[in-house]
Image: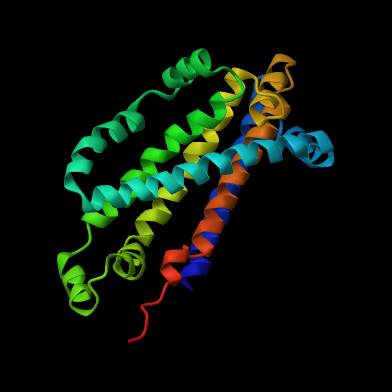
């Protein structure tokens, strides 16, 4: 019943946004300022009918997933180390904070100057995602109730079994939240870097070309595609529990 209610509210919210768009399009009545809904949807479906556009989507997805994979591995490893070693946490936390708070546009411009146009989208995606994974892992570990750890240590005081069967399952929600935040931020940052660097075979470059050619229906269509991608990632992560949640405590 609760799930049906949430689904109904979600549908109502989407319908409200659609209604606002349609009404605004009628009022403005200028496709250069606000493309009509039907024009954007036509451009949206043209994307999937074009092999080159599908290749562009795949290239951007690969860049995002590669940055996410590397950032997740390093973020988890360093977050675990910081959770168990206070001196390392004291040293590394300011670095993570700086990476998390530095203006995206500033670091993107700097990276474009230093590393060039091809590598920058990968680096900026990693730098924006990594602090979220790290701080989610570190915060989850130091937030575990000491009583739970003490109970597990009485039964099994081995580090690796404690990590896989106690710590990781207890911080799995923190990891999932970090992943959700990382995907949303990662898509935005990656596409912005692609736009600024005009990376070939990228959604960012397609947005740039559509803007230059005054094809604002295509700008809206690519933007709509990015929103759909972010929503699909969120559904996927929420539907499938992280691997660490599936780990069972070994039987004695």
* Location of the C terminus (image quadrant): bottom left
What is the image's colouring?
rainbow
Residue at x-position 70% and y-position 41%: 58
Q: Position of residue 25 (x, y in %)?
A: 66, 30
Q: How many marks?
A: 0
In the picture, residue 74 is in which quadrant? Answer: top left
- Is the residue 208 above or below the residue 17 in the image? above
Q: Position of residue 227 (x, y in %)?
A: 59, 41
Q: Pick whichever, 36 or 111, lies toward us.
A: 111
Q: Position of residue 237 (x, y in %)?
A: 51, 57
Residue at x-position 28% and y-position 49%: 81
Q: Report if residue 30 is visible in the image.
A: no
Q: Report if residue 58 is visible in the image.
A: yes
The reply, left or right, for residue 225 in relation to residue 137 is right
Q: Pick whichever, 149 or 81, lies toward us.
A: 81
Q: Position of residue 88 (x, y in %)?
A: 22, 42
């Amino acid at each position: 019943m609760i799930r049906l209610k949430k689904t109904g509210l979600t549908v109502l919210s989407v319908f409200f946004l659609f209604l606002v768009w349609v009404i605004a399009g009628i009022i403005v009545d200028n496709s250069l300022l606000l493309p009509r809904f039907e024009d954007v949807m036509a451009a949206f479906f043209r994307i999937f009918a074009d092999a080159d556009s599908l290749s562009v989507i795949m290239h951007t997805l690969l860049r995002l997933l590669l940055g996410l994979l590397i950032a997740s591995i390093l973020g988890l490893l360093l977050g675990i180390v910081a959770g168990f070693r206070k001196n390392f946490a004291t040293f590394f936390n300011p670095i993570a904070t700086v990476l998390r708070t530095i203006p995206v546009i500033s670091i993107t411009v700097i990276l474009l100057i230093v590393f060039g146009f091809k590598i920058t989208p990968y680096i900026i995606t990693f730098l924006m995602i990594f602090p979220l994974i790290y701080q989610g892992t570190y915060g989850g570990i130091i937030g575990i109730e000491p009583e739970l750890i003490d109970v597990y240590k009485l039964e099994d005081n081995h580090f690796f079994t404690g990590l896989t069967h106690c710590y990781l399952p207890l911080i799995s929600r923190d990891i999932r939240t970090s992943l959700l935040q990382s995907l949303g931020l990662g898509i935005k940052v990656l596409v912005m870097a692609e736009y600024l660097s005009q990376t070939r075979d990228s959604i960012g470059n397609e947005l740039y070309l559509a803007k230059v050619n005054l094809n604002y229906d295509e700008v809206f269509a690519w933007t709509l595609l990015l929103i759909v991608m972010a929503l699909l990632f969120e559904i996927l992560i929420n539907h499938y529990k992280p691997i660490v949640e599936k780990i069972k405590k070994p039987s004695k």
